[in-house]
Amino acid sequence: MTETSQPNAPKAAPAGGSRATMKKELPERFKSYRHVWVFIEIERGQVHPVSFELLGEGRKLADKLGVELAAVVLGPPGGVEEAVAECFAYGADLAYLIADPLLANYRNEPFSRGLTSLVDTYQPEILLLGATNLGRDLAGSVATTLLTGLTADCTELDVDADASLAATRPTFGGSLLCTIYTLNYRPQMATVRPRVMPMPERQHKPIGRVVTHPLGLVEDDIVTKILGFLPDRDTNKANLAYADIVVAGGLGLGAAENFQLIKALAHALGGDYGCSRPVVQKGWMPAERQIGQTGKTIRPKLYIAAGISGAIQHRVGVEGADLIVAINTDRSAPIFDFAHVGIVADAVRLLPALTDAVTRRFSPHTRDRLAG
């Protein structure tokens, strides 16, 4: 139930359960640790949106604790100034900056060394990172180096009466939610996947306090070398996390060929398409199309789920949608417990009718306007 390689570091309790049996014994050396930090992920010169989402969530935690919210920016000189300014626009009180040519491209060793040095020097009590490929790699290395706990792929973050971070995530294959506390170590670390948290509203704010810090490495200290960069040119790659309209299918569609119905409706609506985990396990759809805790987390304006039962693993990946429409023959399916609109029907028969209606009623211009 813990996401750390350190024995006995984080202690866990059921979500919403009592902590009466858990004794908080924070060592004296950690009592000076304060403030909430968010690592700002920059790749190819662009800030990943999950960083701004985490600044919004970090703002809430910092306000509850009565501490400052800091953005942590690592990158090359001349390539991070705009990112630093944006962090203040999304709620940061200050920024910690390591600007060094060795940070022009992500490599685990210099980024881990830099972030660990910042933590050791300025001592945050909470450190949040995005659960991206980069964030997962960096978070694990930093947590291991600092000998602290790390809770991965959280769906909810809060602080309790003792000012401890309560990090909630699905466990046991997504069948339960577990809230994990790192009681005896600092910083308390957690990763959150893109689109789990809402994007905060951007404010027009001046650049605040920026604390610069040296990296303290030379190229010869780093084992890995960047020989080149080959971008992914697959234009058909799924971008479910940021689609405004998503149509998805489950095992209730009955056969792999019926997923053409999902694709057709998604195309008619000007959206993207996906599926539930059992569909990927069947081999009917590729893993990049999976929606849920172990797939993509989405926050579209409209989500249509056809033939999906709605187990908790799927629910945590879609419940941020503005409007959820569920189609299922089983009127007792769990998805009807959280869908905004429920239709008890055979999706294989209903989907073509919906696609036809959308195609006849809405022009491409109208669909673009609705999606916007």
Image (tube, helix red, strand yellow):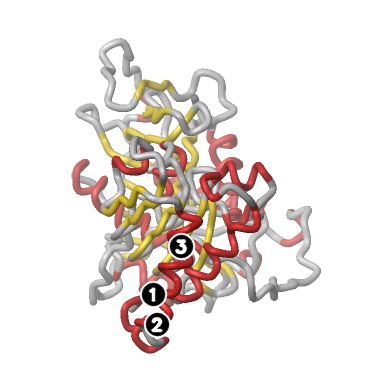
Q: What whole-number distance in Å separates the C-alpha atoms at marks 1 and 3?
A: 10 Å
Indicate whether 158 appears above or below 215.
above
Whether tag 2 and tag 1 are in contact, CB under 8 A, the answer is yes
Name the residue type under label 3.
Leu
SS for callout 2: helix
Front residue of 279 and 14: 279
SS for callout 3: helix
Q: In the rendered view, does 99 fall on the left or right side of 166?
A: right
Q: What whole-number distance in Å separates the C-alpha atoms at marks 2 and 3?
A: 14 Å
Mark 2 lies on residue: 360
Instruction: Give the residue at x 59% y 57%.
Output: 258
Q: Give the image location of residue 248, x and y in percent.
A: 49, 57
Task: Give me the disc on residue 15.
Answer: none
| Label 1: how many Cα within 10 Å (few below 14, some 14–19, many 20+) | few
Q: Give the image location of residue 299, x and y in percent.
A: 38, 59
Indicate whether 109 appears above or below 41.
above
Mark 1 lies on residue: 357
Name the residue type under label 2.
Arg
